[in-house]
Image (cartoon, helix red, strand yellow):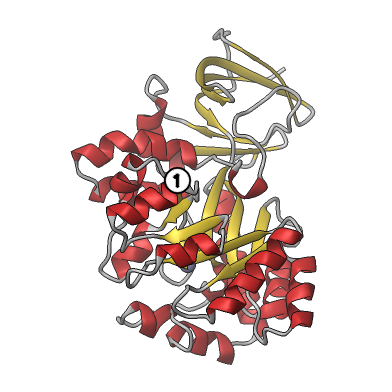
Amino acid sequence: MPHINGAILTEDGFVEGHISFENGVITGMEETLPPYPLMSGIVVPPFFNAHTHLGDSFIKDVPAGTIEEIVGPGGYKHRMLESAHDEAIIEGMRRSIETMISTGTLGFADFREGGIKGVELLKKAADGLPIKPVALSRPVEGTGEEVDALLKISDGFGMSSISDHDFEFLRMLSEKAHKKGKIFAIHFSERIREDVEKLLDLKPDLIVHAIELTGDDMDSIAEARIPVVICPRSNRFFGKSPKFCELLEHGIEVHLGTDNGMLAEPDMLEELRFLHSISGNEGKKLLGEMVMSLFERKLLKGDAIGLKEGQSATFTVIKKPWKYPEKGILSAEKEDLHIFLRGSDTNG
Ligand SMILES: [Zn+2]
């Protein structure tokens, strides 16, 4: 029975030992290091990319501009999407999904614009690939019929921002989504500071960016236990920076996403390395916590983190020294990854 030695991420955190598997299933995990391992390293569940817009992956050159001009309603991205052929959009999404799989990400939450058709394009792009999209849709017409149909075919809603939509419409979407046990997510305070009281009114399951916040805003978000997804490379494009130290210090659950496919490759390790590079000493210390959130799947009704006996042998081995696993993950490059899908090493 093959086994891998190293630091294994279990439900109780990293444990030094080995993991064995057979017929695509994890058969055992023990705190011993038997000889002749298949390989050694840091063994982790697949990453979860907590925020993407894969639909714009096909756009190659993005001009300089403000958030409004580039990704706001009616902006450059939306004009490009309107004039693009479905095939080009699907191909761009598929390329991004393949990048995710080859960099150890097997789940992602996509803000899927374009109504019913938008969700269908994503499903086509992911068809047959070993990845789980969480599709957070966005109505185009906003009729009750469309909203109900979207709740049937998607995992909920992913909206632009409080400033971009009619507030009562957002409230209706949130109520309908929650009634059906689905997700309501929204960008918040990316460009300008938005009203946190209004945000709380919407009871979001997740917010994205949360840059322009005061300390009081952060306290309110922490108290309401709303997870925040930060996207540092996308922020940099617009000359901004996430306040991830402050968010963590306020007790907010922070996750990582890669945002628009046209701005950055959906590679979680690259996002993490970038965050590391812009973080001061205090931030670098806090990044250990951030690393764990890469695997966090309690977010958005996912499973608990950690590898377990009896589960599918789908995991990533990061071939790095494992004494300090968080450090190893932070310095990992694509070449250090071995992605196992149901027990087979996709790197051969
Ligand atoms: Zn976004």
Which residue is nearer to you in this view: 239 or 27? Answer: 239
Examine the image and state in which quarter residue 21 appears.
top right
Count of marks overlaid on the render: 1
Q: Left or right of 327: which side holds 19?
A: right
Q: Which residue is located at x 70 percent, y 50 percent?
A: 130
Q: Which residue is located at x 67 percent, y 25 percent?
A: 308
**Residue 189 at x, y percent in the picture:** 38, 66
**Residue 213 at x, y percent in the picture:** 32, 60
Residue 285 visible in this rendered orientation of the protein: yes
Which residue is nearer to you in this view: 145 or 276? Answer: 145
**Residue 196 at x, y percent in the picture:** 41, 63
Q: Which residue is located at x 37 percent, y 48 percent?
A: 219
Quadrant position of the C terminus in the picture: top right
| Amino acid identity at mark 1 | Glu
- Vertically, is 304 above or below 172? above
Residue at which label 1 appears = 223
Under circle 1, the secondary element is helix
Q: Residue furthest left?
A: 281
**Residue 284 at x, y percent in the picture:** 27, 38
Q: Which residue is located at x 40 percent, y 40 percent?
A: 290
Q: Left or right of 24: which side holds 243?
A: left
- Vertically, is 254 above or below 88? above
